[in-house]
Image: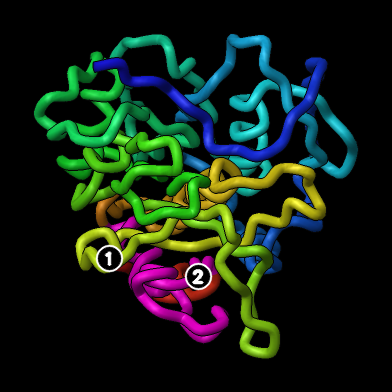
Amino acid sequence: MKIVRNITVASLGFLAFTAVHAQTVQNWMSPEVGNAWSQGYKGAGVTVTVIDDFKSSKYYIGKLGGYTQIDLHGNFTKQEASLIAPLATLRTQDYYAGTAVGLNPGLNVLNLSYSMIARAGYAITQIGWNNQESSIIGHAKNGRAVVAKAAGNAGVVIGTPNAAGNVDYLGVALKGAASAIFVGALTTHGSTAAPASLASYSNRPGNDAVVQRQFLTVGVLGDKTGLNGTSFGAPIISGYSAILGSKFTQSTPTQIVNQLLNTARKDTIAGYNAATHGRGEASLTRALAPVSIQ
């Protein structure tokens, strides 16, 4: 069996460029991010670790910071999370590192904007995980870190074969994990006046109630950033998790995950149904509203 790492994005680029950005609400962000910042919640005290491609020669072109950049996939996902939660501590690990993902003191968030694919037909017990994925799966199952996993871009139900007959077994392994969230992509930020729709490429939870319970959607505005794919939904949830952690400083990763899931909106999605949209659209404002969370 050969298992292949695959990033979940739908844009291409050619050269590398990295820049530093001010703490500015970008036009692709939900307005709820600015509301959170105005209350003083920007991710302070939280560590976000982005496991992604930081070493290849495969470049992408995007406009996250208000101007055109050309960079590696991992640098874009890291930048997106850091723009949403500018006071969080950002760490990176290349997805080919193979070493266990360590955790810092305080709340930890792991961003996974990649899949691990192989031919359909294997049991999860047949997958020989290395130390990196074993640690990620363990952190999620044991509630040691928030794990934001991009749902994938094959337009299929999570855990089922894509058009090439391959399955994302990393997604299968995270099914039912205490502190893991699958992140699907909406075409825009929804509202009751203008509900959003699931992006045609986004994977969905299907009829599995377990996956439905841990599936969230967010607006991925590729028309503004040039970067489409659930790859760029996961860092939004990573950033939201860090913002929540900077308010609810004593909360566990599982509590942070449940808060996001339990406060998601269904009324901002056109034709909402659990098999397509899971819990609904993440609402940072609703998640931040209470004095404390359980």
| Mark 1 nearby-residue class (10 Å; few <14, some 14–19, many ≥20) | many
What number is the disc on residue 213? 1
**Residue at the left extreme, as displayed:** 125
Residue at the image position 55 percent from the left and 20 percent from the top: 53
Residue type at mark 1 is Arg
Residue type at mark 2 is Glu
* Viewer-side residue, 23 vs 76: 76
Q: Please indicate whether residue 87 sits to the left or right of residue 159 in the image.
A: right
Region rendered in magenta? 255-284
What number is the disc on residue 281? 2
On the question of residue 2 being in view, the answer is: yes
Q: How many marks?
A: 2
Q: Quadrant of the N terminus?
A: top left
Could you say where residue 25 lies in the image, as x and y percent from the top left?
A: 76, 55
Residue at the image position 44 percent from the left and 72 percent from the top: 280
| Mark 2 nearby-residue class (10 Å; few <14, some 14–19, many ≥20) | many
Could you say where residue 157 lies in the image, as x and y percent from the top left?
A: 36, 56
- Whether the magenta-drawn stretch holds residue 19 is answered as no
Q: Of helix, strand and loop, which one carries label 2?
A: loop
Could you say where residue 49 lies in the image, as x and y percent from the top left?
A: 45, 29
Q: Is residue 47 above or below residue 227?
A: above
Residue at the image position 80 percent from the left and 19 percent from the top: 14
* Viewer-side residue, 247 vs 166: 166
Contact (Cβ within 8 Å) of mark 2 with mark 1: no
Instruction: Looking at the image, tell me whether mark 2 or mark 1 is earlier in sequence order.
Output: 1
